Amino acid sequence: MDKTLLAKTAAAMVAKGKGVLAADESSGTCETRFKTINTPCTEESRRAYRGLLFTTPGIEQFISGVILFDETTRQKTTEGVLFPDYLAKKGILPGIKVDTGAKNLALCPGEKVTEGLDGLRERLAAYFKQGARFAKWRAVITIGEGEFTLPTHPCLYANAHALARYAALCQEASIVPMIEPEVLLDGGHAIERCEEVTEATLRATYAAMAAHNVSLEHLILKTSMVVSGKTNARQAGVDEVAERTVRVLKRTVPAAQPGVVFLSGGQSDVSATAHLNAMAAMGDLPWPLTFSYSRALQNPALNAWRGQSANVGAAQKAFHHRAKMNGLAAQGEWKTGLEKQAA
Ligand code: 13P
């Protein structure tokens, strides 16, 4: 465990005005995304698309790291450079998704537990050699109301336990763990319920980190924001989302931690930017806040690309724009007008 390297990596991930691109969609998720643009999902089309994102000129100003999927670590740019090497040369940290997915949690209908601990020590050692300096593990927490009140205690604690064991293995391998307990925004629940569940989730997560001797100084939290359930009639505004999210983080996330990043979770690209901006603008926080979006960074680029090499330039322009907007939002310096100027 190289604590100097871990501290350096974690600080670089949340450097001022920068955030992390999540490009670690599994091939199944990629297929779903590519279907929306009528593009076949093949090893080559995934390589071409990821290559388009990574080679966008100038993104290193706003992107500190990229979370890769296993397949992508062995793929190359058109010039034949392995993607992790290409990113590292550009000053962007290569990261890797190491969980093997959320599976049904036995005896807990409607809930999931994330798997992937078996053989993880060996996989982390191999990824480190390939250049990975941070790793991601996503736990999924579902809010349910009515007959089944979710999440249940076993779901919160099984996921927290797995996150802590993964985080400890990462630190042992000198790889910064990005722990991602995602509270899904699906459902008809009110934002108050999302706040309660997010708080309970983070409490369970940090209790497990302490129980497993995980070093808080060498850890990045990737969290969902506190938002209204997708189908709830009252959709909270930007300021309310920001206030509730920051309140929960202040209650639960130790000040020793080097940073907090957000997932977008199905929010529109501009909402995800506006929410981050409102939180960063509040100031007086013990840790830097920034983005680690997949959909909210990629959707405009994906829609501009549509699988056509002739559209690469337009797609890169769209990606650069979202990265820049989120880089500003991480400093509380984004304004709606900047979106219009670009349109
Ligand atoms: P979204 O920003 O699309 O939610 O993806 C982030 C992520 O990494 C999910 O694990």
Image: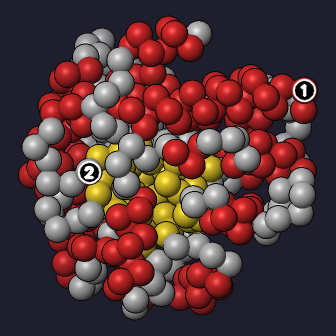
Coloring applied to the structure: secondary structure
Q: Which residue was labeled with disc 2? A: 288
Q: In the image, is residue 168 above or below residue 296?
A: below
Neighbours of disc 2 within 10 Å: few (<14), some (14-19), many (20+): many
| Mark 2–mark 1 distance (CA, rounded to whole Å) | 38 Å
Among numbered discs 2 and 1, the one appearing first in the sequence = 2
Q: In the image, is residue 229 above or below residue 47?
A: above
* Quadrant in which the N terminus is drawn: bottom left
Say which element carries label 1: helix
Residue 108 percent across, percent down from the top left: 38, 57
Q: Amino acid at mark 2?
A: Pro
Left or right: 231 in relation to 266? left
* Residue at (29% x, 46% y) in the render: 289
* Residue at (47% x, 64% y) in the render: 137
Q: Amino acid at mark 1?
A: Ala
Residue 265 percent across, percent down from the top left: 45, 37
Residue 284 percent across, percent down from the top left: 10, 43
In this rendered view, identify the residue nearer to me: 17 or 206.
17
Q: Which residue was labeled with disc 1? A: 310
In this rendered view, identify the residue nearer to me: 169 or 193.
169
